[in-house]
Amino acid sequence: MARRIIIDTDPGIDDAVAILLALAAPDELDVLGIVAVAGNLPLAQTERNARRVCELAGRADISVYAGCARPLRRPLATAEHIHGETARDRLLLPEPIMALQPQHGVDFLIETFRAEAAGTITLCVLGPMTNMAMALVKAPEIAERIGELVVMGGACFELGNVTPAAEFNIHVDPEAAAIVLDSGIPITMIPLDVTQQVLTTPKRLAALHGLGNRCGLLAAFERKRRANFGGRGRALHDPCVIGYLLRPALFGGREVNVAIETHSPLTLGMTVADWWGVTGRKTNVRLMNTVDAGGFYDLITERLARLP
Ligand SMILES: [Ca+2]
């Protein structure tokens, strides 16, 4: 039976490829809905991009909801310098025809976790954790009904990508991340330590491009256009979350405590991981630190071949 998931996302380039990967695996992943959040771009663009990506994959039947339009306590800081040239601009994805769902995304999360059997739904968080934190504020009892949260976020041994200390998703809404990490929900975290190992190479891009379909082209094209930090190739961040669900054996890590810095102007949004267990703090996260990058690219290439 397919694993039932909800995708919480701010597309965004990486997000688009992650959504495609999920929609390319209907035998393994049943996408109950997609909830957009403000992050890489303002909410009006992330929810629209989510619908565009569903239509690109031929899945206009997926329900897309708009969630929170800004972080809990802070003004929104987007990454439009990276994601502003969206897939639509570059690959001329048309305005979406499928409608946005009228229900607020946070209420969709609450309603779904209340209605479905406890422990049966996985939430994939590919952006700031604002929606899940809001859901926990409105309905704390859903924490024990959530099967697992698989999160792209944080940086532990690797340094941050938005400040020297912090990764973008956590830095945008550190208070939300702190609420979610303190919730007791089983959390798997895929930080930059992992995603910065999943780097593009000319051969990997050629394989995606060579699929000859629109979804493969989108994945290859968006990967190619920016060199990564240090010119090593470009990381695939958010697709690692879906890759983990499809092939958990590609990833390795350990159970640790992760706490979020929410005060220091110097290190705001830092994911403080107690890798060696020196604090006595209770473990709350399965923190990934290794990945089989070649296996991951084989997986994504094979799956995206199934899409239009
Ligand atoms: Ca994202």
Image (cartoon, helix red, strand yellow):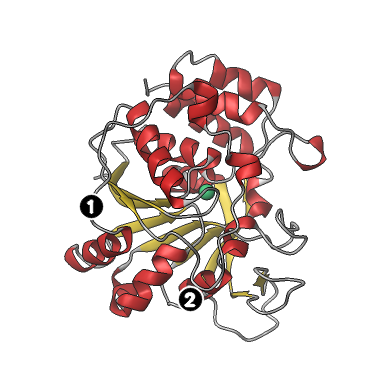
Question: Of the numbered discs in the image, which one, if any, rests on residue 102?
Answer: 1
Evaluate whether residue 292 shows in this view.
Answer: no
Q: In this view, does 72 lie above or below 109?
A: below
Q: In this view, does 65 lie above or below 258?
A: above
Label 2 with label 1: CB-CB less than 8 Å: no
Type of residue at label 1? Pro
Which of discs 2 and 1 lies nearer the camera? The answer is 1
Q: Where is residue 109 in the image (x, y as percent from the top left)?
A: 29, 62
* Label 1 crowd bin: few (<14), some (14–19), many (20+), radius 10 Å: few
Quarter of the image for residue 237 reads top right
Q: In this view, does 118 lie above or below 204?
A: below
Q: Name the residue under label 2.
A: 179
* Nearer to me, 227 or 288: 227
Q: In the displayed image of the protein, which residue is found farthest to the bottom?
A: 280
Residue at screen point 17% across, 65% down = 115
Q: Where is residue 279 in the image (x, y as percent from the top left)?
A: 67, 85
Quarter of the image containing the N terminus? top left
* Nearer to me, 228 or 196: 228
